[in-house]
Image (cartoon, rainbow, N blue to C red):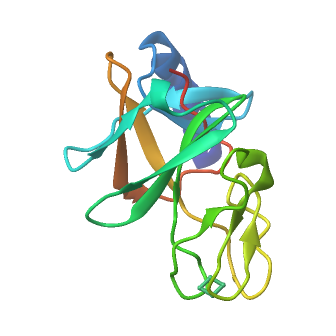
Amino acid sequence: MSYTHRVDRERRLICKAGLALGAVAVLPACGDGTTVAAACSSSSVGVGNAADVPLNGAMMHPTPQANVFVCHDANGFYAVDAGCTHLGCDVQLANAADLKQGFTCLCHGATYDANGEKPTSPAPAPLKHYLLCAQPSGALVVDVTQAGVESTVRLKV
Ligand code: FES
C-alpha cells in the first residue's frame, strides 16, 4: 500500500471515528465536508458559554497566551486570535453588532473578513484560528497550543 493510500485510509477511519464519538471539538480533514473529533489539551482556557455568543456575533476573551475572539456564524463557532498579523495590535469587530463586517485594526488600518481572512495592507497574513472545544454544559474552551486550525472549521454546539 502506498503512503498516499495509507494516509487516505487512516484519514477516512479517523473521520468515521470522530463522527461516531459525537465530536466535542472539530478539525477539518474529511474531504467530503465532514469533520474529525479532536481534543483540546489540558492547557485549554475557558472562554465563556456558547449561549453567550449570538449568531453573527463575537466576544473577545483574554487568555494567558493571547486574546481570542469566539465567533458564531451560521455554520457554528470558531476561535480567532485577536492579534493583528502586522505588528500584533488587537483587532476589533468592524461592527460590534455584526460579525459579517469582519475585523479591523486601529493601529495601521488593516482589515480582515469575518473569518479572519482576506487581510488588507499592511497585514501580511490572515488571523490564526485555534482549536475550540465544548463541554457538555455548553462551556467553551480554547486551546491556544493548537493554532493553525483551518479557517473553515466550525464547532457545533
Ligand atoms: S498592527 Fe494591525 S495594521 Fe499594524
Q: Ligand 1 lies in which image quarter? A: bottom right
Q: Give the residue furthest to the left.
A: 42
Please provide percent x and percent y for residue 148.
52, 59
Q: Residue at x 38, y 21 (%)?
A: 138
Q: Residue at x 37, y 46 (%)?
A: 142
Q: Residue at x 26, y 44 (%)?
A: 41
Number of numbered markers? 0
Is any part of residue 1 visible from this angle?
no
Q: To which quarter of the image does residue 72 belong?
A: top right
Please provide percent x and percent y for residue 47.
36, 43
Is any part of residue 130 visible from this angle?
yes
Left or right for 108, reference 41: right
Left or right for 131, reference 109: left
Q: On screen, 86 above or below 94?
A: below
Q: On screen, 148 above or below 75?
A: below
Please provide percent x and percent y for residue 139.
34, 28
Of 24 and 46, the residue lying toward us = 46
Q: Residue at x 53, y 34 (%)?
A: 53
Please provide percent x and percent y for residue 80.
54, 55
Q: On screen, 43 above or below 35?
A: below
Q: Quadrant of the N terminus?
A: top right
Of 129 and 93, the residue lying toward us = 93
